């Protein structure tokens, strides 16, 4: 379950900064902590269909918090691609996203490119386990 509300600061036409962080407690007891200042594009949905399905979600599909958690899991890659997507599904269920199964399947089968891009994009920012960034 989410432990706090999501607050965002708008950056440009596609990205936001998370303000105040975001926490989610998974059913297995693990905790996801998205830090203040994390940059997100929310749900990676092509702009052409934002009028139908905006990246922040809708009252029927309030996917915003789950999308931020999913973006953070992709950025940090502290779990596998499959695990990140299952955690996204759990977060959507917790936020009562009506179409969570369809959204999950779209991510499961369509987000490999984003995972690979994030692997390259964020690899220089990650430190090996047991070391600290200088």
Image (cartoon, grey):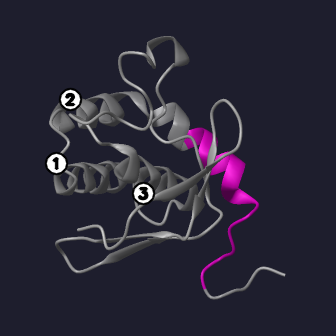
Q: Residue 99, percent across and down?
A: 18, 32
The structure residue drawn at horizontal position 49% and vertical position 50%, both measured from the top left corner, is 71
For disc 2, the marked residue is: 102
Judged from this view, the residue extending furthest toward the top is: 48
**Label 3's element?**
helix
The structure residue drawn at horizontal position 44% and vertical position 59%, both measured from the top left corner, is 6
For disc 3, the marked residue is: 69
Crowd around label 1: few <14 · some 14–19 · many ≥20 (10 Å): some
Q: Residue 36, percent across and down?
A: 60, 69
Q: Which residues are magenta?
A: 116-129
Kindly check if marks 3 and 1 are in contact, taking CB atoms under 8 A apart as contact: no
Q: Which mark is residue 96?
A: 1
The structure residue drawn at horizontal position 53% and vertical position 32%, both measured from the top left corner, is 113
Q: Earlier in the sequence, mark 1 or mark 2?
A: 1
**Label 2's element?**
helix
Compared to 30, does 112 lie above or below? above
In the image, taking residue 58 as reference, residue 48 lies left or right, namely: right
């Amino acid at each position: 379950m989410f432990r706090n509300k999501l607050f965002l600061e708008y950056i440009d036409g596609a990205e936001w900064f998370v303000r105040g962080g975001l926490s989610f407690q998974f059913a297995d007891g693990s905790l996801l902590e998205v830090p203040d200042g994390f940059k997100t594009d929310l749900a990676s949905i092509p702009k052409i269909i934002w009028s139908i399905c905006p990246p922040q979600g809708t009252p029927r599909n309030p996917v915003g918090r789950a999308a931020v958690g999913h973006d953070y899991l992709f950025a940090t890659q502290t779990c596998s691609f499959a695990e990140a997507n299952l955690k996204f599904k759990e977060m959507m269920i917790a936020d009562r996203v009506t179409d969570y199964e369809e959204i999950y399947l779209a991510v499961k089968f369509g987000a490999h490119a984003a995972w690979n891009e994030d692997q390259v994009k964020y690899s220089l920012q990650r430190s090996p386990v047991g070391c600290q960034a200088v």
